Amino acid sequence: MPLATPIPRLLASRALISARTPAARALLRPRVLRTFASEAAFDPDTVERAQDEVDVCIVGGGPAGLCAAIRLKQLEQERGGDELRVVVLEKGGEVGAHILSGAVIETKALDELIPDWKELGAPLNQPSLGGSMRFLTSNSSFPLPHPPQMSNKGNYIVSLSRLTAWLGEQAEALGVEVYAGFAGAKVLYTEDGKGVKGVVTGDVGLDKDGNPKESYEPGMEFYSKVTLIAEGAHGSLSKEIQNKFNLREGKDPQTYGLGIKEVWRVPDEVYRPGEVVHTLGWPLDFKTYGGSWLYHMEDNMVSIGLVVGLDYQNPYLSPYKEFQRMKHHPFFANVLKDGECLAYGARVLNEGGLQSIPKLNFPGGALIGCSAGFLNVPKIKGTHNAMKSGMLAAESAFAAINAAAEHAPEAIEETEESEDSEETVISPLLDSHPIDMSGYATAVENSWIWQELKEIRNVRPSFHNPLGLWGGMMWSGLDSLILKGRVPWTFHNKVEDYDATKKASEVQPIEYPTPDGKLSFDILTSVSMTGTNHAENQPVHLRLPKVDGAKAEHTKINAGQYAGLLGRVCPAAVYEYADAEGSEVDADGKKFVINSQNCIHCKTCSIKTPTQDITWTVPEGGGGPKYSASLSPSSKRNS
């Protein structure tokens, strides 16, 4: 069942409006109405596009991408120059809008990048006062030993979306061109197909059938010496590049968890600022990996959430409904019962660890942040590693660009253009000599990122055992408290998350309680709290293969054999297998419905679908959730 509250697309960020660059001029010049011959099918690949050449193009304006951009400009300033062009493309309508809030972060990467962050007003206001772990049964809980790796002393409980917005401000102040509302939609390859030379932003103004409306504007081609992919976990360009360059060869499959989160404001009597609690056990069974948290943030806000490993077996399981019933446990209910739910969101997390990190570089660029997968699973923390990876990529890119200029100065010359011209001449060297970013991979392996992930490399894979939770707890406790990763072996997992799913005939259905509207909510109420909006008349960005019978085949298998798993695993009610009759039927009396305007960009569908036939692509830039404004304390208090 779709939500129906579209918002106008944000055309540009403050940086774009003020920038005097070829990109800014092309994107801001008056729109020209176009007409196309109705008898011919519209092919966007034949459209003439504006072009611009930059030094580094970063796809994704999250912590990793912005830290890479900041570090690049710092290095340029240290050299005494101000000519390095760095562009950040962010699909959210504003920087931070697609970043899920309510997290505990370590500051060591931020300390390295911006040592005076406190004086500059970084929104890190609530220090963690420690942490604890508890095991939940259905009605009670008891404490567990707290591994030293999970200590939260010195960390901060933050709104990650607000921190990301602040990083965007720092980047802009240094001269980074941050283009919010523009999604990186397509990779530009070199003529021989052996390297990457940039990206194309998404088209705007196509209708649901892919035909141009009067407002149609084609996406822009950004050619770059180095392209850094910072889309987050399971991004569309990340997947394409990993497949294109075989970056996963010899690596374990990446596994994922779905994190579902709410932020509440609670009364003073139950508010304990700085408290951090993680739990294991109920509501999940011993065969399902996962855990929950409760963080007491600033301003009487608490973040509560549940992560469910997407390698779960039972297709009747609903991560959303598990989370909703979890809040009725006395441990959580006593905190939330007189509070107010302010925000909701969901996102997949990389859980594969060190064994699942792909080759990090490809000709002409690199994967950074969660596009690569640096999450520390036991800590449920990855922001510090993502930020550090961006910084290391920046240092490698800066060195590689300068080395290329020294060896072939005539090919790296600045583009010649007059002030009145909007034509850009693209360097032919981008096709013939893609920059080598292998130094970045070496730098990561020599950094504290690798050291940290190596120590805990066996924790998550240890849960792949016949005893499930119990076996994993025994090993991870021994490894975390005593061995600390100092063993000569490494556990491996060779099963993809979707392959772990059993057929409905092999399991028992799960019955969930009805939401009470106070502690627990129906799914559309929750989605309404994400601020999600997509233009209604645009191409569906969740796509089945373009072959005859794809919809019928999908419905027959997923509804018939897996009890309509997508309708349960999606945390935003995007998918339905609705009862139908006559010509409406896709298969077995069901019609497969995709409510794409509900999508909160969590990527779960393309990971867990047993048939692996759902492809997540970027919608029009600016669409999707809007998490950043949802956690402004003053606005919520006054609302």
Image: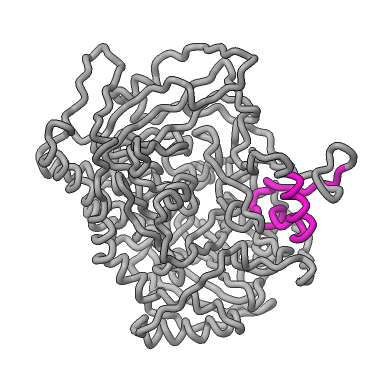
Q: Is residue 36 left or right of residue 231?
A: right
What residue is shown at x 63% (from left), y 68% (from top)? Answer: 500
**Does residue 551 lie above or below 25 as drawn?**
below
- From this viewpoint, is residue 281 visible? yes
Q: Is residue 571 magenta?
A: yes
Q: Position of residue 607 (x, y in %)?
A: 58, 56
**The C terminus sits in image quarter:** top right
In this orientation, which residue lies closer to the viewer: 61 or 246? 246
Residue 604: image quadrant is: bottom right
- From this viewpoint, is residue 173 visible? no
Q: Is residue 163 left or right of residue 22?
A: right
What residue is shown at x 79% (from left), y 68% (from top)? Answer: 505
Q: Is residue 452 magenta?
A: no
Identity of the residue furthest to the right in this view: 582
**The N terminus sits in image quarter:** top right
Per the rendered image, the range of residues in magenta is: 551-580
**Does residue 352 lie above or below 367 as drawn?**
below
Q: Is residue 227 left or right of residue 288?
A: left
Q: Position of residue 477 (x, y in %)?
A: 46, 84
**Does residue 629 lie above or below 281 as drawn?**
above
Residue 434: image quadrant is: top left
Q: Position of residue 572 (x, y in %)?
A: 65, 49
Q: Position of residue 207 (x, y in %)?
A: 62, 25
